[in-house]
Image (cartoon, rainbow, N blue to C red):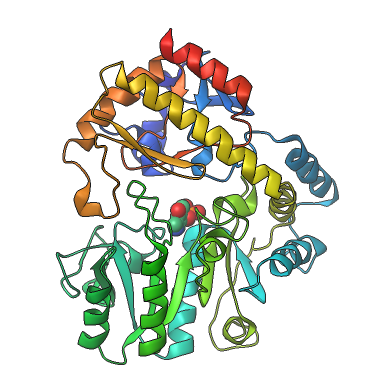
Amino acid sequence: MNSEELFEKSKKYVPGGVHSPVRSFKGLHTTPRFINRAEGAMTWDEDGKNYVDFCMSFGPLIHGHKDPDVKKAIEGALERGWSYGACEKYSLELAEYMVDRLCFIDQVRFMNSGTEAVMTAVRLARGITGREKIIKFNGCYHGHLDGMLIKAGSGLAGTADASSKGVTAKQAADTLIVELGDLAAVEECFKAHPGQVAAIFIEPLPANNGLLVQGTEYLQGLRRLCDKYGALLVFDEVISGFRVHFGGMACLSGVTPDLVTYGKIIGGGMPVGAVAGKRAHMEFLAPVGPVYQAGTLSGNPVAMAAGLANMKKLTPDAYKRLDQYSEEIVKLFSEWSESHGFQDYGIQRFGSLFWAAPTKEKLTNITQIPNNLNERFYELFKVFLNKGIYLAPNAWEVGFVSLSHDEKILKELRKRLWD
Ligand SMILES: *Cc1c(COP(=O)(O)O)cnc(C)c1O
């Protein structure tokens, strides 16, 4: 069966034919491609076509598909068994590897997804502070837990409403929405809800509604406000962690969060999420503390082994190469778009994350994103897909460069773009 037939069949058995909505190619007037196999920077679909992949499983595969060292680690763990629901060494080794290298954490708790990590961090922040409300920013995504599926009202805090049916008014009321980049609005929010805000949650590198790079002074300002009003600062580094730097934005910016959430790269393509922080905060978690958190498959040996193997290859030299590949690829895309009907396009880039949008301006806030983004993206996506270049199938998703996107792939890209 080809992709079209498989998708038709899937829609019979699965809502919308997918297990995560963004995979459905909604609004792109074509069928999602069913991937048959992948290696390095390339994927092959069920129709026999191949692609240079810039989705990379939405971020985890920083070394590319089917990295041989990660594969070996998975096979090694698999050989012994794949789930014990008991203590094992794999999760200890991964925890030790992280804590030894990240100065802002003493302890880590593993779970199975980024959503779970944020869910735990929300409960933990509330348990630590004894407060109920959280601040989140318009344009930041923190997974699909109820309290984070809240979109902004306009301007200052207060008028939050849910982005999803099924989220209760009570849950929405506990999430205060503020525009990115506006410290005064954050302070207003604290003042409007005195003694009630448990934490600020932010993607320190917002990369889920386009790429909206924030300045270091802004993150420093959030740190100051948290200290002033007794709230925790939580960095959601599910995308940025181990990608922009081994220590994520916390290391790059020098701004120390109280709690950090991880996902994506931490599992090397296996389902892993994590919450990390200082011992005094982390030991609020059960079984030591009063905040409950658990998981049948948490710290899964195969996933832990994959995560550790993935991480061990992230040397300073790896980050240098990643940045160099990314720069060259973005340069190539820019050169191509100037002469192929996409002159209105610009590319926002931060390390190995990039995002194309029909503007040359640097964007830092969701309100600055051009209105024609979706219709222009559809055109770009179609051209790229035909040329065998796979972008994440949604205008708001960023592109991911991996360490497999090397000089050879750059040459292949040039060929595909200009052919
Ligand atoms: C992907 C992502 C999540 C959700 O992680 P899942 O593993 O998809 O549940 C949360 N926060 C950020 C910043 C993310 O990029």
Up the image or down, 270 lies above or below 110; here it is above
In the rendered image, residue 207, in percent from the top left (x then y), is placed at 40, 50
**Which residue sits at x=53%, y=68%?**
254
Q: Nearer the viewer, residue 133 or 290?
A: 133
Left or right, 251 with reference to 398? right
Up the image or down, 362 lies above or below 411; here it is below
Left or right, 89 with reference to 224? right
Residue at the top extreme of this rendering? 419
The quarter of the picture where residue 126 lies is bottom left
In the rendered image, residue 291, in percent from the top left (x then y), is placed at 53, 84
Up the image or down, 342 lies above or below 219; here it is above
Up the image or down, 359 lies above or below 248; here it is above
In the rendered image, residue 214, in percent from the top left (x then y), is placed at 37, 59
In the rendered image, residue 275, in percent from the top left (x then y), is placed at 57, 69
**Which residue sits at x=25%, y=18%?**
341
**Which residue sits at x=31%, y=34%?**
346
> Taking the image as drawn, is residue 47 in sight?
no
Left or right, 161 with reference to 260? left
Marks counted in the figure total: 0
Quadrant holding the C terminus: top left
The quarter of the picture where residue 38 lies is top right
> Taking the image as drawn, is residue 115 in sight?
yes
